[in-house]
Image (tube, rainbow, N blue to C red):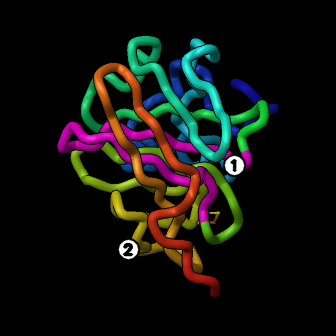
């Protein structure tokens, strides 16, 4: 298990957030705040310049399935990003920080939502709207423009998360 980057990286820990919560390993994962979503294996799949994150989708097989996601973070990025292939096949991007205490988020397959990896399970829809849990506000969602194999994400929020 990865203990340094805030995510579960061991195969035995993988699963959907809801299914995972039903076993003791899932509970410990939540207590420790380990997300299920991995960082993009090919870190050259993205670049960032002038407020825009550009992702080469050909290099991100993690997003092949509906309800999947990948973490993009580090380098010069101003915030951690969660990029999700929604249940509807569309791409969605979020600031990857729960509005309760900043833990990372995971997509919840077949639910049309993303969920905090922590015990509070704050849950948000694809617009970033808070649905339930300990989160204090909506999570920031960013517009995604997909063209061919490129996804361009303007890291200006669709709407700023409400303070609170
Ligand atoms: S950090 Fe997300 S519910 Fe607490």
Q: Which residues are magenta?
A: 78-98
Question: Which residue bears the numbered disc 1?
Answer: 79
Q: Is residue 4 left or right of residue 161?
A: right
Q: Residue furthest right?
A: 4
Classify mark 1: helix, strand or loop: loop
- x, y percent for residue 22: 42, 48
- x, y percent for residue 18: 38, 49
Dot 1: within a 10 Å radius of its alpha carbon, few (fewer than 14), some, or many (20 or more) residues? some
Check if residue 158 falls in the magenta segment.
no
Give above or below for 54 relative to 138. above
Q: Nearer the viewer, residue 40 or 36?
A: 40
Q: Is residue 102 left or right of residue 82?
A: right
Can residue 42 be seen? yes
- Label at residue 131: 2
The residue located at (58%, 24%) in the rendering is 46
The residue located at (36%, 33%) in the rendering is 68
Q: Residue furthest bottom?
A: 164
Q: Quadrant of the N terminus?
A: top right
Q: Quadrant of the C terminus?
A: bottom right
Give above or below for 74 relative to 100. above
Chain-order first, disc 2 or disc 1: 1
Give above or below for 43 relative to 31. above
Circle nearer the viewer, 2 or 1: 1
- Label at residue 50: none
What distance separates the C-alpha of mark 2 from that of mark 1? 23 Å
Q: Is residue 100 left or right of residue 16?
A: right
- x, y percent for residue 96: 59, 50
Ligand 1: image quarter:
bottom right
The residue located at (47%, 55%) in the rendering is 142
Classify mark 2: helix, strand or loop: strand
């Amino acid at each position: 298990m990865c203990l340094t980057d805030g995510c579960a990286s061991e195969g035995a820990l993988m699963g959907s957030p809801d299914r995972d919560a039903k076993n003791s390993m899932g509970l410990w994962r939540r207590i420790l705040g380990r997300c299920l979503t991995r960082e993009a294996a090919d870190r050259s799949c993205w670049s960032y310049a002038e407020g825009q994150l550009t992702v080469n989708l050909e290099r991100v097989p993690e997003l092949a399935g509906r309800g999947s996601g990948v973490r993009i973070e580090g380098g010069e990025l101003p915030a951690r990003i969660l990029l999700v292939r929604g249940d509807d096949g569309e791409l969605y991007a979020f600031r990857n920080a729960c509005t309760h205490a900043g833990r990372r988020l995971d997509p919840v397959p077949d639910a049309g939502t993303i969920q905090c990896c922590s015990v509070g399970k704050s849950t948000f829809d694809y617009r970033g709207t808070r649905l339930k849990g300990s989160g204090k506000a909506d999570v920031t969602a960013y517009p995604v423009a997909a063209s061919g194999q490129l996804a361009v994400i303007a890291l200006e929020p669709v709407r700023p998360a409400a303070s609170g």
